[in-house]
Image (spheres, grey):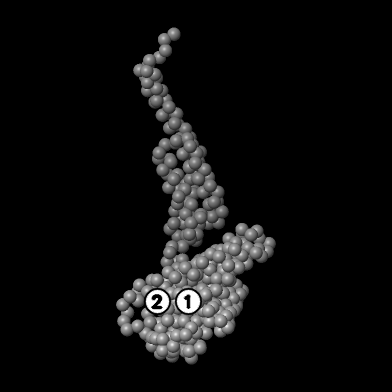
């Protein structure tokens, strides 16, 4: 028996191709007809949601949306595996992407999210971690006291607590005039914008670290707060010894009321996660961490905003405004603003208000 030649083999393949194409087309048509009703219904729901949100969707369609989405996603998977026609595949890919966004994607645009965040979301998240704020505040006060006491007993502790870059002429043994000169205003604004960028990067790094360490049950976050405030306590002692505690406090208050508040919130946010993991209650540890993590993340977004404000205050008003009274006024105004915003500002939830308006 003679074996087939290469030419005869290709001839058979060419003759078989039309029937294969017809079979694939028939299979694709049958697949589409069996499921097209669900696809069309899903598409109508998605189009309505894209035009007017949930208010344009009736309850039956809203309940059916997740199931219809999963059906379309399954159909897309089958279409890819069986190499159905390109038109069906392209239609399903587009439909599944649009449906995913409506089922799992964000419900608001950026400006709507920003409006809700500023007008209630941020302050609400801060109030929800009030216990952690109290614990973090106690740790910060204790850290400042410890730093003061250590340096008062042995001035060598100053160089262990205060980095060399910050100490410069502000060190034990410096004269009153030398210390006072470090609190003077700048003669111009040259280079202050670069200084502001550096300060923001440094301050934000401290806050992010205090937040990130919270996953170790919050203990490292508290230690970081104590260490940073011990440094401040050491500097407070230094200026108090020179009779400049009022001038230094005024100089610090310009940006410090915002910066220290932000550090307090970042430490509290990290502690909130760690405390929820250590004491999850009836939830699992992962669920407790997820819930507290979302709340703390909202707080941290706001902390970044506070660090931007603190860096600008530190680089400009603090460097350009003279006089203890003027500096205290600036720092006091910002402290009053943050306290009022976080603890006195209680707006209604915007999503609740929108639902009531729609009803």
Q: What element carries label 1?
A: helix
Q: Name the residue under label 1.
A: 259
- Of residues 114 and 39, the one nearer the viewer is 114
Report whether 35 appears left or right of 200.
Answer: right
Residue that appears at 35% across and 83% down? 186
Query: Which residue appears at 68% of the width and 62% of the height?
Result: 282
Q: Where is residue 295 in the image (x, y as percent from the top left)?
A: 55, 66
Which residue is the extreme one toward the right? 282
Name the spot of residue 242 as percent of width and height, x first.
48, 89
| Image-quadrant location for residue 202 | bottom left
**CA–CA distance in space, label 2 to label 1:** 11 Å
Q: In which quarter of the image is the N terminus?
A: top left
Query: What residue is rendered at 53% in x and 67% in y?
Result: 211
350 or 181: nearer the viewer: 181
**32 displayed left or right of 274:** left
Q: Where is residue 324 in the image (x, y as percent from the top left)?
A: 43, 89
> As drawn, is 273 to the left or to the right of 15?
right
Q: Which of marks 2 and 1 is nearer the N terminus?
A: 1
The reply to whether the C-beta atoms of the residues labelled 2 and 1 are less than 8 Å apart is: no
Q: Residue 142 carries which label?
A: none
Disc 2 crowd rating (10 Å Cα; few below 14, some 14-19, many 20+) is: many
Q: Residue at x 65, y 64 (%)?
A: 278
Q: How crowded is mark 1: few (under 14 residues within 10 Å), some or many (20 or more)?
A: many
Q: How many marks are shown on the rendered structure?
A: 2
- Dot 2: element: helix
Establish if 274 lies above or below 50. below
Front-lying residue, 272 or 196: 196
Give the quarter of the image for residue 87. Answer: top left
Please give the residue where the numbered disc 2 appears in the rendered image: 312
Residue occupying the far top of the picture: 1
Percent across and percent down for residue 7 are: 35, 17
């Amino acid at each position: 028996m003679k074996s087939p030649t290469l030419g005869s083999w290709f001839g058979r393949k060419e003759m078989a191709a039309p029937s294969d194409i017809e079979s694939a087309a028939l299979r694709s048509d049958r697949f589409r007809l069996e499921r097209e009703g669900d696809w069309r219904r899903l598409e109508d729901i998605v189009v309505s949601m894209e035009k007017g949100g949930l208010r344009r969707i009736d309850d039956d369609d809203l309940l059916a949306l997740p199931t219809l989405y999963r059906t379309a996603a399954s159909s897309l998977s089958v279409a890819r595996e069986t190499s159905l026609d390109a038109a069906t595949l392209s239609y399903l890919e587009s439909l599944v992407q649009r449906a995913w966004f409506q089922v799992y994607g964000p419900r608001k645009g950026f400006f709507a999210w920003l409006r809700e965040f500023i007008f209630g979301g941020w302050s609400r998240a801060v109030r929800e971690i009030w216990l952690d704020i109290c614990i973090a505040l106690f740790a910060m006060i204790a850290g400042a006291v410890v730093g003061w006491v250590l340096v008062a007993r042995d001035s060598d502790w100053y160089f262990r607590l205060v980095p060399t870059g910050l100490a410069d002429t502000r060190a034990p043994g410096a004269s009153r005039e030398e210390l006072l000169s470090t609190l003077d205003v700048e003669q111009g604004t040259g280079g202050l914008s670069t200084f502001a960028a550096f300060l923001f990067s440094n301050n934000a790094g401290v806050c992010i670290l205090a937040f990130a360490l919270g996953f170790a049950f919050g203990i490292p976050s508290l230690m970081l707060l104590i260490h940073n405030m011990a440094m401040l306590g050491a500097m407070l002692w230094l200026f108090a010894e020179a009779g400049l505690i009022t001038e230094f406090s005024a100089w610090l208050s310009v940006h410090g009321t915002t910066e220290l508040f932000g550090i307090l919130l970042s430490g509290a946010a990290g502690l909130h996660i760690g405390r929820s993991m250590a004491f999850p209650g009836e939830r699992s540890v992962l669920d407790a961490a997820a819930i507290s993590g979302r709340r703390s993340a909202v707080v941290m977004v706001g902390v970044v905003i506070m660090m931007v404000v603190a860096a600008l205050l530190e680089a400009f008003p603090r460097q350009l405004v003279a006089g203890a009274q003027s500096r205290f006024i600036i720092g006091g105004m910002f402290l009053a603003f943050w306290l009022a915003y976080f603890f006195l500002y209680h707006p209604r939830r915007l999503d609740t208000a929108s639902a009531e308006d729609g009803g």
